């Protein structure tokens, strides 16, 4: 997700991307981002390409999508999904060849055809004032095909005669809601046994190994994983983990315990978040058989001394510094859940870090349970037996 400066960030990045292309086609040409009333060529400039944002709209598909990293029972305002509509128009000095605008337009269209996605590195370099480069969904720039009548009406509304132009749309740009959500404390027990309902097949449907479950489903660094299934004793096991952002595979040494279970240990080098786990069985002849994937959530762990005691400033705000393992990587979304209030982390450096900073405005004195959430996975809030909330996992605001 990104901040309210994301719209300007797309315009600035488009201008920077197109500038290289048009200068190769027309040396000395410039790319501007102005209203058509002020667009054109300046003294000493032979030609210019203008990028004009003339309309914004809402992406209908993303509008009805639940907010990311929201757990059942939590409330959070969804992000605003925008589609930005641009008009690319070429201009040339009166004394220059009238074909110059066409050359500019052709170079710009060719550049966007070859590179239809605004990459994170381009967004960061051209628009460092926004955090749009951290948005996980790519921003794609594709040709739009408005009716000729719509274009004529647009130029008429701008008070100018029609000029040869190309219409494009940038989709999708998310703007985070500034309204704080609510994240209630988790349920300690479900049902009389505290386990809730369970269902698993009793037999395999074929000779291929099947992975039924990974326990614990939410593991902290250093925890031992127990992977259960059928056919897991048909070779030397190992566990491979992959992550949508951090990549992989990460291979964990494992051992077969008999009875259809394999165990492995989670290391601190693994980033927190939602991973996918498979069991790989190596046969003596060198062949391998791999189970289907099962989800594994690796939770962050707060390593700062708890409870955290902080004092409000004169404006009623508090600054919280939290140490954690594993390190949080660029592109991951980190929040501190203070009571039932999610507080986003301040922007990080461009490398993994184990120290996060949070600012909470309008804080009220009191003692609040605290959790660290990274990519939707929370740090533990209960004691070792998971029978009650850990009284030390708290923030004390004075």
Image (spheres, grey):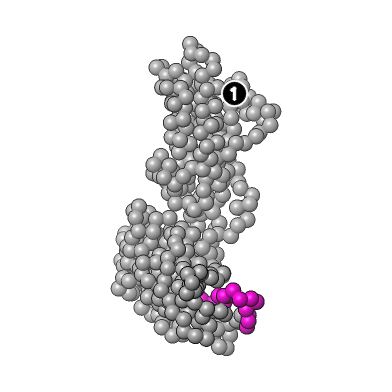
Closer to us: 28 or 82: 28
Residue at 52 percent of width and 45 percent of height: 139
Image position, residue 377 (x, y; %): 47, 68
Left or right: residue 63 versus residue 265 is: right
Q: Is residue 105 above or below residue 11?
A: above
Q: Is residue 37 visible?
A: no
Q: Compared with residue 135, is residue 182 higher up or lower down, i.e. above or below? A: below
Residue drawn at (53%, 40%) of the image: 116
In the current view of this chain or complex, which residue is farthest to the top?
95
Q: Residue at x 53, y 60 (%)?
A: 68
In percent of width and height, residue 91 lies at 51, 21
Q: Quadrant of residue 384?
A: bottom left
Left or right side of 55 for 270: left
Q: Position of residue 242 (x, y in %)?
A: 47, 64
Between residues 286 and 67, which one lies in front from this camera angle?
Answer: 286
Give the class, few, some or many, for how many residues have Cα within 10 Å of label 1's Cα (few <14, many ≥20).
few
Residue bearing mark 1:
164
Residue 336 falls in image quadrant = bottom left
Region rendered in magenta: 201-217
């Amino acid at each position: 997700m990104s901040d309210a400066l994301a719209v300007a960030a797309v315009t600035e990045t488009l201008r920077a991307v197109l500038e290289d292309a048009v200068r190769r086609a027309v040396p000395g040409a410039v790319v501007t981002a102005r209203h058509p009333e002020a667009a054109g060529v300046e003294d000493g400039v032979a030609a210019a390409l203008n990028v004009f944002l003339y309309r914004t709209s809402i992406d209908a598909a993303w509008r009805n999508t639940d907010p990311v990293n929201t757990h059942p029972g939590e409330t959070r305002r969804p992000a605003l999904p925008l589609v930005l509509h641009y008009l690319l128009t070429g201009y040339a000095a009166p004394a220059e060849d009238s074909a110059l605008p066409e050359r500019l337009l052709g170079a710009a269209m060719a550049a966007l055809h070859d590179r239809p996605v605004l990459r994170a590195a381009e967004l960061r370099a051209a628009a460092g004032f926004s955090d749009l480069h951290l948005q996980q969904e790519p921003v794609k720039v594709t040709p739009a095909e408005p009716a000729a009548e719509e274009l004529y009406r647009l130029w008429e509304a701008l008070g100018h005669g029609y000029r040869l132009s190309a219409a494009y749309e940038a989709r999708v740009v998310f703007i985070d809601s500034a309204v704080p959500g609510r994240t209630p404390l988790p349920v300690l027990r479900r049902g009389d046994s505290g386990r809730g309902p369970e269902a698993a097949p009793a037999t395999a449907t074929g000779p291929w190994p099947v992975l039924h479950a990974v326990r614990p489903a939410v593991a902290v660094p250093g925890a031992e994983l127990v992977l259960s299934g059928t056919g897991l004793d048909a070779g030397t096991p190992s566990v491979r983990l992959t992550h949508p952002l951090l990549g992989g595979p990460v291979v964990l040494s494992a051992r077969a315990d008999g009875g259809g279970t394999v165990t492995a240990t989670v290391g601190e080098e693994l980033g927190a978040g939602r991973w996918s786990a498979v069991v790989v069985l190596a046969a003596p002849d060198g062949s391998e058989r791999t189970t289907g994937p099962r989800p594994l959530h690796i939770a962050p762990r707060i390593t700062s001394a708890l409870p955290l005691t902080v004092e409000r400033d004169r404006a009623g705000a508090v600054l919280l510094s939290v140490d954690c393992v594993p390190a949080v990587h660029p592109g991951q979304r980190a929040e501190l859940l203070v009571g039932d209030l999610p507080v986003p982390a301040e922007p990080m450096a461009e490398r993994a870090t184990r120290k996060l900073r949070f600012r909470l405005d309008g804080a009220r004195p009191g003692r609040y349970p605290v959790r660290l959430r990274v990519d939707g996975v929370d740090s533990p809030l209960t004691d070792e037996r998971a029978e009650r909330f850990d009284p030390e996992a708290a923030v004390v605001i004075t």
